[in-house]
Image (tube, grey):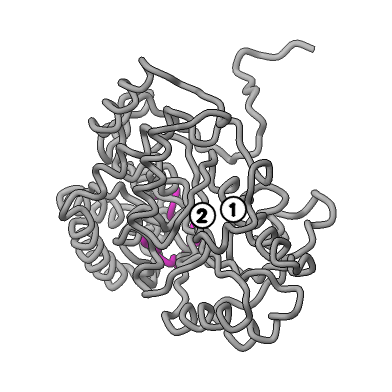
Amino acid sequence: MTKSASTSHLLPVFARADLAFTSGEGVWLTAINGERYLDFTSGVAVNSLGHCHPHLVAALQEQATKLWHMSNLFKSPDGERLAARLCEESFSDYVFFANSGAEAMECAIKMARHYHFSKGQPERTRIITFEGAFHGRTLGTLAATGAAKYLEGYGKPLEGFDQMPFGDIEAVKKAVGPNTAAILIEPLQGEGGVRAPSHAFVRALRELCDESGILLIFDEVQTGMGRTGSLFAHQRFGVTPDIMSLAKALGGGFPIGACLATAEAAAGMAPGSHGSTFGGNPLAVAAANAVMDVMLKPGFFDHVNRMSLLFKQKLASAVDSFPSVISEVRGEGLLIGLKAVVPSGDLVAALRDAKLLTVGAGENVVRFLPPLIVNEAEIEEAIQRLETACVALSPSAAQQQGAAS
């Protein structure tokens, strides 16, 4: 069978926009045709320091001349340093490095089950999760997510997950039983529509876990590494988990995931209980250490929070100006959701036409995920492009277009 030169051999699992880029710098991307786009997608919360940050580029270039891959059968001094830094800045005692958020979550799920197995309670395998969550694309993390649209066509979901209404502590209490191993939650749902649980709810989950002898797992794949204005989103609640997953922004664009845990939660893990061929490879570790260098500098998160406040204020003004198009501002830090009145996909497309890149979410929400190094002028530029998109989608514009045709 002959195929035309224009046929793509990429598996068609993404509804890709007809747009491709050749380069990026900071918050800007340059398309093949030379047009510049303001990137408020950041690779879906990945390019936390923007495109081609000089410190990250230098770290990768230096590492690329020394060592690309070493098996985890041998020691990793740079990996040890990264793990120590993450532990110093968090609740954790141990870190496992993976290649993605889904892999980090798989480690968290296995660790929670193995913890109870090691305590002589092998029946405790079930994990409580929440409606609207998203935990990854493997069969295990899809089962934890629980959404029918992701599970359809893959057979019976992996057993062991009990999904509860988001924010309903009484439902969670009733769901905890002799087979429960852990509770798994995102401190701020990204894919689910930028939905935040109340502080009281998260504190109640911690208390329930302590009372029941089960583990609390935070999925911070999207919220972690500065996205919500602190290094980890759960720090804003004053609640610490037993296990936490990270990925996305950890490598600033280079693939790396991590599962962090207390010594107690990791008590069941021993040589052979988990592993990864590429997890913690020298290139990924170099990128992540470079990200840590930048984020741990004094004032970094002050900047993120200042930009967040400014951006949310300007978005609120836009909501007031275009109530027929947008209706609500959500989120923390620079994980911001704008609830649309029009279909969110139409708003994403109109923003793209205005050369501003965003990404959709649940509940008809559009996510704005600028790099954390975004400045005031770039936020003002984004607001102007948002207003352009809102004008194009407003009822008056549609009426004028109809009259013209």
What type is the residue that disc 2 sits on? Ser
Tell which of 140 and 182 is nearer to you: 182
Q: Position of residue 226 (x, y in %)?
A: 33, 55
Q: Amino acid at mark 1?
A: Met
Q: Position of residue 231 (x, y in %)?
A: 33, 57
Quadrant placement of the N terminus: top right
Residue at 74%, 69% (x, y): give it.
124
Using the rendered image of the protein, determine whether residue 346 is visible from the camera's viewpoint: no
* SS at badge 2: strand
Q: Which residue is mark 1?
A: 105
Magenta span of residues? 335-350
Which residue is more in the foreground, 349 or 76? 76
The x and y percentages for residue 351 are: 37, 49
Residue 245 disc label: 2
217 shown above or below 381: below
Q: Are marks 2 and 1 in contact (CB under 8 Å)?
A: yes
In the rendered structure, the answer to whether residue 378 lies left or right of residue 113 reads left
